[in-house]
Amino acid sequence: MFWLSASDNPYADNRQILVPYSDSMKAVLKRGGQEAASRPSGYTMAAGAFGNGNGGAISGNLIVAANTESNSDYIRNVKAAGLPVHPVRFPAALPETFIKFQTRLKDLVFEPFGGSLTTAAVAEALDRRWVASECMLEYVRGGQLRFPSAKAA
Ligand SMILES: C[S@@+](CC[C@H](N)C(=O)[O-])C[C@H]1O[C@@H](n2cnc3c(N)ncnc32)[C@H](O)[C@@H]1O
């Protein structure tokens, strides 16, 4: 994933995408932090370091998300409408991570390659405004079924 910004100071807050602490970190928190120790690097760890819980750990660069959706409302509704199921949808966790990380409530999310409107549906669920473009009308019509209250295109 590339993260491009039109400004030098884009909004980003990794506290919005914390992940659960590991068992070893939970143990550190439980005992009130690290014991004082000198590290091989020369850094001296103060007693109690890393003793404050912050609700979760900073997530890594790797997003682990299965792409195995096979029984969703989207698929059922698209098939029932006689429309093609988009063949290369990505997992909702992908846009969800970036939308939470880099936008605030009511911000505008633009998806230039809308496909089945996965990004749009995630943006809507996260209370962001969104705009999507897609060159295949039948994919837009299928994606529209993710929004039951939307008027037909
Ligand atoms: C990889 S798919 C996106 C799938 C989407 N993320 C989802 O989960 O459904 C890329 C989409 O971009 C569309 N596309 C390709 N070139 C385009 C263009 N120039 N303008 C608008 N849409 C385009 C394709 O038709 C295709 O549906």
Image (spheres, rainbow, N blue to C red):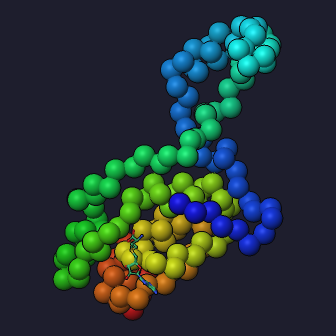
Where in the figure is residue 62, as x and y percent of width and height? Answer: 50, 46
Where in the figure is residue 28, as x and y percent of width and height? Answer: 62, 15
Left or right, residue 132 beside residue 15: left
The answer to whether one can see residue 147 in this image is no
Left or right, residue 65 beside residue 15: left
Residue displayed at 52% across by 75% down: 111
Left or right, residue 72 beside residue 144: left
Q: Nearer the viewer, residue 146 or 67?
A: 67
Q: Quadrant of residue 150?
A: bottom left
Ligand 1 shows up in which quadrant of the image?
bottom left
Q: Is residue 132 above or below residue 19?
A: below
Q: Is residue 91 above or below residue 63?
A: below
Where in the figure is residue 14, as x and y percent of width and height? Answer: 66, 47
Q: Is residue 92 above or below residue 34?
A: below
The answer to whether one can see residue 66 in this image is yes
Where in the figure is residue 20, as x and y percent of width and height? Answer: 53, 33
Residue displayed at 63% across by 54% down: 101
Q: Nearer the viewer, residue 8 or 70?
A: 8
